[in-house]
Image (tube, rainbow, N blue to C red):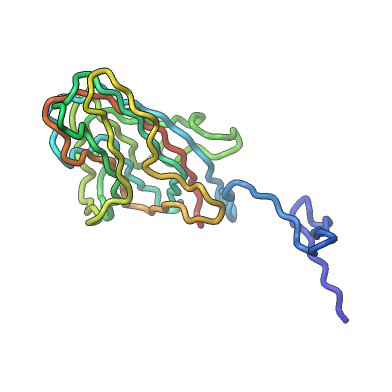
Amino acid sequence: MALTIITGSGINADVQVQSDRTHQALRTSTRPLEYYVGNIVGGHYSVGAMTGLMTAGIASAAEVFQIRWADPVKLFILKKLTVQCSTATGFAATSQGAPLELIIGHGSTSNGSGGGAVSPSSISNRLRSSMAPSAFVTSGRIGISTTAALTAAGGQTLEPATVANCMGADNRTLVSTPVMNLYEQRDIGSHPLVIAQGDTLVVRTNTPAATGTWYAAFSMEWVEAIAY
């Protein structure tokens, strides 16, 4: 009977795979998503950004946070996107405040504009210094509102249904919400949200009440890699 021996690779080429005595199950350890594929180095990244004071009466479907991915080689792999809102001037007592929704877009040809650009530098926002600078250094855009809606990415077509929703800003004056997940890959083996060149991710308002003013703070974690 032929004997098959499984070993590692690279610096572990001579290290044999181990199994447990009782159940003969292979021993594995859960690790972050691989970002170094072939000869192309990507990375894991994190960024936080806060709007200015959003004016009263902002329209429904107003974009307040947007991502346009323009890299032709790597994929944008979303791991987590959260938002926390704080109301400055309360909305009508019977209103729902300012709900938010996350939606995917396709076919963009140019970056959105307005507000502020969240711009990683060649040495910032990486979770390890040996990772490559984010592709956002040279292409695409992360945009966040200052006081009003952002201008949408040129040519984008949004999907007809949202990926996620949250209640957004509370209707009461000087109330901050808990941190709310718009997206999170929680379970091992669950599929992350993956977009390619020309795709967009948009956080926009969903029929907000007319009178309140509010802030929103976003935190995002993502991976850039050529394959998933």
Relative horizontal placement of residue 157, taking residue 43 as reference (left or right)? left
Q: Position of residue 114 (x, y in %)?
A: 21, 31
Q: Position of residue 22 (x, y in %)?
A: 83, 61
Looking at the image, which residue is at 21% across and 38% down? 205
Quadrant for residue 165, please give it: top left
Q: Position of residue 54 (x, y in %)?
A: 21, 25
Q: Position of residue 213 (x, y in %)?
A: 19, 23
Looking at the image, which residue is at 16% across and 32% down? 95
Question: As displayed, is residue 174 above or below residue 39?
Answer: above
Question: As displayed, is residue 83 above or below residue 15?
Answer: above
Question: As displayed, is residue 25 above or below residue 125?
Answer: below
Looking at the image, which residue is at 13% across and 27% down? 92
Quadrant for residue 96, please give it: top left
Relative horizontal placement of residue 97, taking residue 180 as reference (left or right)? left
Question: As displayed, is residue 188 above or below residue 113?
Answer: below
Relative horizontal placement of residue 76, taking residue 55 as reference (left or right)? right
**Residue at the right extreme of this rendering:** 1
**Residue at the bottom extreme of this rendering:** 1
Quadrant for residue 13, please give it: bottom right
